[in-house]
Image (spheres, rainbow, N blue to C red):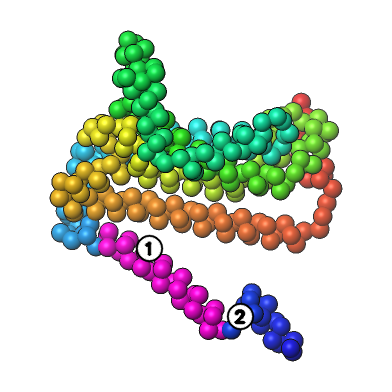
Amino acid sequence: MNTTHVVRSARAGTTEPAWVRYTLIGTALAFVFLFLLLPLAAVFTEALRKGFDAYLEALKEPDAWSAIRLTLLIAACAVPLNLVFGVAAAWAIAKYEFRGKAVLTTLVDLPFSVSPVVSGLIYVLMFGAQGWFGPWLQAHDVKIVFAVPGIVLATIFVTFPFIARELIPLMQSQGTEEEQAAMVLGANGWQTFWHVTLPNIKWGLVYGVILCNARAMGEFGAVSVVSGHIRGQTNTMPLHVEILYNEYQSVAAFAVASLLALLALVTLLFKSIVEWRFEREQKAAALLPPENPQKQILVSPV
């Protein structure tokens, strides 16, 4: 095997024949076209079938506008709360050794294995009229199920693993040497987090927030159970799309669906930018000569 062949094989990444690589690439592209690009094109085509004016009218309709506002509100509530939990859980799991650590790690993954419908039923069992806390809530005129608080709780449940799961392996790979060096230099816990830990995990954190926000805006199963489908009050965008489609208002349904698709595409764009920035920083850091970790920590002790 000559040097040129070795270089070409290394660049290709594998040593399989060219026809195998092209077949795999073609299969992947065909799946992307058939199951991603074609459905997206169909959504936008159907949404604009009666013209752009009809498209705008469907989005201006009061119930649709209410669903859009509620979806953004739910995401604005769920994502920051999951951000706090995700950072705290990832820090505890990656930086400390304690009894029950394996149990906590397993519980973080629980929403990935539990059906969203089941998670919605859990909140109905707890806060519904016949639930564990239902009589007390009714006596104090507090509404959780079939109201915005229940939707927020259900959305938090199904989305809370995303940020933690992005940060845990990243923090574990970084170790604790820099945090320990910051403590030696006199930094307190907040200074250590702000000046040492956060800069090291910022791109993973942003990536997790993007994924969490995308799931929060698109969640259907859990929200469908706890919302009660009250038009103009507890319908999010996915629920509003279902109602419109069941009422044979296909143009309006696909108009709202196209807005969801646009939000997904924007999320994908941000995700790609974050990945590109992270890879660029990783490559730049790999080119730098190794330094003493204590020299890299710029904190001012109290």
User: Can you see residue 224?
Assistant: yes
Write down the region rendered in magenta.
Answer: 18-44
Foreground pick, 79 / 38: 38
Foreground pick, 60 / 22: 22
Q: Quadrant of the N terminus?
A: bottom right
Image quadrant assignment for residue 262? bottom left
User: Can you see residue 72?
Assistant: no
Residue 170 location in percent, x, y?
66, 47
Residue 21 location in percent, x, y?
54, 78
- Report the Cα–Cα distance between label 2 and label 1: 28 Å
Image quadrant assignment for residue 139? top left
Dominant secondary structure, magenta: helix
Q: Which mark is residue 16?
A: 2
Using residue 292 as the reference point, say whether residue 23 is left or right of it. left
Foreground pick, 275 / 226: 226
Q: Which residue is mark 1?
A: 36
Q: Which mark is residue 141?
A: none
Residue 210 location in percent, x, y?
49, 47
